Each structure stands twice: as C-alpha cells, then as structure tokens.
Image: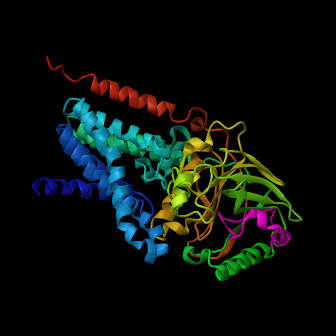
Amino acid sequence: MRRVRALLPDLGLGAVAALGLAPLGLWPASVLALAAILWRTAADGAPAAFWRFLAAGAGWFALALFWITEPFLVDAARYGWMAPFALLLMALGGALFWALPAGLAARLSRPGTPRVAAIAASLLLSDWLRGWIFTGFPWAQIGHVWSDTPVAQIASVTGALGLGALTLAAAALPAATRRPLAGAVLAALLIGGTWLAGQVRLNAPLPPDRSVMLRIVQPDATQHLKWDPEWSTVFFQRLLDLSAQPGPRDLVIWPETAVNFLLEEAGPVLPIMSEAAGAPLIMGIQRREDGRFYNSLATILPGGTVGAVYDKFHLVPFGEYIPWGDALARIGIGAFAAQQGNGYSSGPGPAVLAVPGAPDYQPLICYEAIFPQHLRGLAQRPGWLLQATNDAWFGTLSGPYQHLDQARLRAIETGLPLVRAANTGVSAVIDARGQVRDSLPLNTAGKIDAPLPGALPETLWTRYGNAPILALIALILAAALRRRPSSS
C-alpha cells in the first residue's frame, strides 16, 4: 500500500496533464504536470520509472478517454456493465505506451539530464508508434493540447508529432538543466516563439474561397433512436427538409450512415433525395456487395443516379469489425457498432474522388480522420478534405470536441480545408489553417450554407511527413543512451 500511495501523485499529475485536451484546452496544466513527472523521474531507476509513468499514463488516458464509456451506455441494459472495464483497459493499455519506453530509457541512460532527455524522446516515439501498432489509435497524443492555439500552426511543418516534441521539450527543460529556473525560462521562450510564429501564419492572407456553395446537413439523430424504424423515418424526413430549404447550394453533404437502408435498396428514394438536395449529394450509407457489408460514402447525382462510391478502409476494431470475424460470426459474435451483418469489410484504401461542380476531394469516414498518415502519398493532391462522421457514439462532454480538434490538425498539416458533416454535431467548415469558419453545435438539427475555403500550397509536412521529427528523436536517444557508463 505504501508503494501504491507513493504513485498517487503521479496518477494525479497524469490526469492534470490531460486537462490540456479538448474541451478545456488548459495547455499550461499539461506542460507543468509533465514537467513535474519528468522532474520526479530524473533520478529513478528503470523499475521506478516504469511504475511512475504507468501511474501517470493511467491518469492521462483515464481522463482523456472517459468518453469511451458512452457507446456502452447507448443500450445500457445490455452493455452498461462493460463501461468501467472498457475504461480501465483503455487507461492501462495506453499507460503501457508511457511506462514501457520510460522504463527502458531509464535503464539505458544515466541519471539527470541524459535520463530526462531519453525518457522525453522515448515518450514521443511511443506516441508515434501508437498510431500504427494494432491498426493504430493516435487519440489523445501529447501534442493535441495545442490544437486550439496559434502553436498548432507549426503542424504544417512538423505534423502533430512536432507539437508533441514541443510539449515534451518545454516540460523537460527545467529538469534537464542544472539551473531549473534557467530551464523554465528557456521553456517559456520556446513556447512564446512558436506561439508568435503561429500567430504570424494565422495573420497572413488566405487564398480566396472557391466558387462552390456547400450545404452541410446535421439531422441530430440520437444514437439510441437512430436505428428505430419509426424514428429513422423522422430523421430521414428531417434530412430531406433541411436539404430542400431555400438557398443557393452546389453540393449537399449528409453525415456518416445518414439513412437506415442499404444503397442497393435505395433505388425508389434516390430521385426523392436528389430532388430535395437540388444539387449533387454526398451521403453516408451502408452497402452490400458479394455478401459483405461496407460503411460508405456515395454520391447521388441529379436524377437519382449513383456516382462515385468510397468504402471506409480503416475500421474501428471491435466496433466496426472483429478480428477473425468470419470465424467468430459462426458463434454469434459480431462488431459492436456495425448495423449490418457481423461487421464491416474494409475498403481498398485512401482515395481522391471527383464530384460535379467542385474540386476533387479526399473522403474520410469518422475514425479515419485521426490518422495523418492517410493524407500523404496519394497519386494526386485533393482540393479539400471531407469527414463524414457519427459522433453520437462519443457522448456530449469531451469525445466530439477531441475528434473535431484532430480534424482541425489534419487541415493544418495538409494546408487543405476540411468540411465536417456530423450526425449530432459538431458539423463544421474548417479553413486551410484549421480555423472553424462555421459550425453547428452538438444536439442541434440544422444546416450550414458556406462557401468552400481555398487551399494553401503543399505544406512541408505533406512533403516530408514525420521523418524530420523521427530523425530528431533518434539523435536525442543516441546522444542520451550512449553516455551510459560501462559495467566493467
């Protein structure tokens, strides 16, 4: 119990650090709390560093991801008992991504400055790996605390990973220098300098808006009623009515899984939808092909014909698909959130699609927008990004706002505007610097009529990705770890 009590301050500091994430955005709390954790670890051996960062990581992820309980409360009678276990597993699983690198770095480095530098660099590397391992889950990364500040603009050069590097550098400087006060001053100058640089970028002129008027429709279909046969008819009529309201529009956008029927069954109502839209319509819909089901975006052209179709390829594990799903389906185990079959099948990958009357765009369905790697390496650069999502799964406290902030970072990283159509909110038009031009709040039915913002030139991050930051991590680790004295 003494050992457990000794780790409670680290658990608390990890939770305080998470206050920098949306919706609070208290980034000073993040920097100070991380600085305190690193300070406490500067002289730790490997076992102590492991346990200290396991506690701190558990605090961070428990507070950052407590929205993970919300999907289990949609049908609380059946799934509510799972909610605390899901949060515990997510918090401890995320905490291991802090504890393992911290313990290893402490084992391979000398106490003091080398240890602090090695742990900070290893945490940053782990944040990057978390976006890839086990299909990836780069939610609540350390750099996300800057999403709603001018500092976020440096992501156009460094990506979100570079924001994490800034955070950990500022937190590490007081503990890594012989004079803590001098280190704190350096940290303040680092943050102040990037803040100023970001503000300068925000003040520069943007390219003119495109001559394309968008209409984004938010039906506010709450998750516990979304698939109810009677209510789904109400929500479908709401989509039609909002789409048909007077006003100019060149393109109408509906959110993820906007309707409760399959694309193959939609033939009789496609002309009705097209007439209500009065323009090409991009809509989220499920579809079936060769006995498999897909979470898709479909373009409905004037007259009700089906144009380009995109299938979501980066699916949510256990939510949209189950590993070894074909085998497990035989015993009745299916994906939690899939509404057709036992789970969705994966589409072919990132794509750039054409739509009449607007520039080509890259579609992102919900969860796909948290993965920056999907926005690079395309055969052509899109003119804008479209995220269709159903954030009703995430509740109303933190999940939807964290998801929105990550979408804003994708706009900054690529220099492309991002249009967001969310079932219950937050729908938004985001310019090429990640600034929200127009939005609809949570739990509100309505529409946004807005021009499509213009795109900036290709960013350095689009060209080089995370390679420069990863190289910096390698240099820091090489400098810190090679100083460990030999055991002879």
Picture quarter with the N terminus: bottom left
Given the current orientation, which residue lies at the most extreme front position?
330
Residue 6 horizontal/vertical position (percent): 14, 54
Residue 430 horizontal/vertical position (percent): 63, 57
Q: Residue at x 37, y 62 (%)?
A: 87
Q: Residue at x 71, y 76 (%)?
A: 236
Where on the picture, by quarter, is residue 299?
bottom right
Residue 282 horizontal/vertical position (percent): 75, 60
Q: Magenta region: which residues?
A: 247-273
Identify whether 373 is placed above or below 306.
Answer: above
Given the current orientation, which residue lies at the most extreme left position?
2
Q: Can see residue 404?
A: no
Where on the picture, by quarter, is residue 245?
bottom right
Left or right of 50 on screen, residue 300: right
Given the current orientation, which residue lies at the most extreme top position?
488
Left or right of 198 on screen, residue 109: left
Residue 61 horizontal/vertical position (percent): 36, 56
Left or right of 472 on screen, residue 212: right
Q: Residue at x 54, y 47 (%)?
A: 371
* Foreground pick, 199 / 305: 305
Identify whether 402 is placed above or below 72.
Answer: above
Q: Judge whether residue 160 is colored magenta.
A: no
* Foreground pick, 304 / 430: 304
Given the current orientation, which residue lies at the most extreme right position?
303
